[in-house]
Image: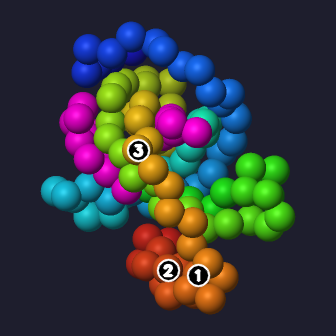
Amino acid sequence: MLTYMAGLTDRRREERFPLAIPIAVWTLLSKPLQGVTRDVSTFGVYLYLKQPILVSTVLTVMMRMPTQLAGHTDTLVWAHGKAVRVECLENRPDHPWGVATWIEGYTFVGEESEAAHMQILEPLKN
């Protein structure tokens, strides 16, 4: 496994929830990327992606948070942060890049605007 780090040590304090959630990821320099989460916490998300990104890349992740984390119902969420570690995962040919992401904040999408946000994902399904 090849790993690139942004000079950070492991300082996790929050519980991580092992969840495989389909995601779309946006960076300033790329088209939307598809992937899946490995785990989610208050300040971090570990992503499996099909394409690599660089350490320190600012990104936005769109995902549907399941009821056990969101509270009452599944909730569409935008997570805003940056990549702090990128790993080449030779044992995952479907999503060969692991990306540890530090999350600066979350935006929760209300039901009234969710349909418009979901249209963003339509082109990614192909």
* Identity, as a three-letter code, of the amino acid under mark 3: Glu
Indicate whether 78 appears above or below 118.
above
* Identity, as a three-letter code, of the amino acid under mark 2: His
Q: In this figure, which residue is indicated by the disc labeled 1?
A: 114
Image quarter where the N terminus lies is: top left
Residue 13 percent across, percent down from the top left: 59, 20
Quarter of the rendering containing residue 71: bottom right
In this view of the protein, can residue 28 be seen by the observer?
Answer: yes
* Identity, as a three-letter code, of the amino acid under mark 1: Glu
* SS at mark 1 in the image: helix
The disc at residue 117 is 2
Quarter of the rendering containing residue 3: top left
* SS at mark 3 in the image: strand
Indicate whether 126 appears above or below 106.
below
Rounded to the nearest angstrom, the CA distance separating label 3 from label 1 is: 22 Å
Query: 23 and 123: which one is in front?
Result: 23
Part of the protein shown in magenta: 42-60
Q: Is 55 left or right of 83, judged from the image as shown?
A: left
Q: Is 113 left or right of 28, judged from the image as shown?
A: right
Q: Is 50 left or right of 20, judged from the image as shown?
A: left
* SS at mark 2 in the image: helix
At 34% across and 26% down in the image, what residue appears? 85
At 58% across and 81% down in the image, what residue appears? 114
Q: Callout 2: few (<14), some (14-19), or many (20+) C-alpha neighbours within 10 Å?
A: some
Mark 2 vs 3, N-terminal side? 3
Nearer the observer, disc 3 or disc 1? 3
* Marks 2 & 1, CB-CB < 8 Å contact: yes
Q: In this figure, which residue is indicated by the disc labeled 3?
A: 104
Rounded to the nearest angstrom, the CA distance separating label 2 from label 3 is: 21 Å
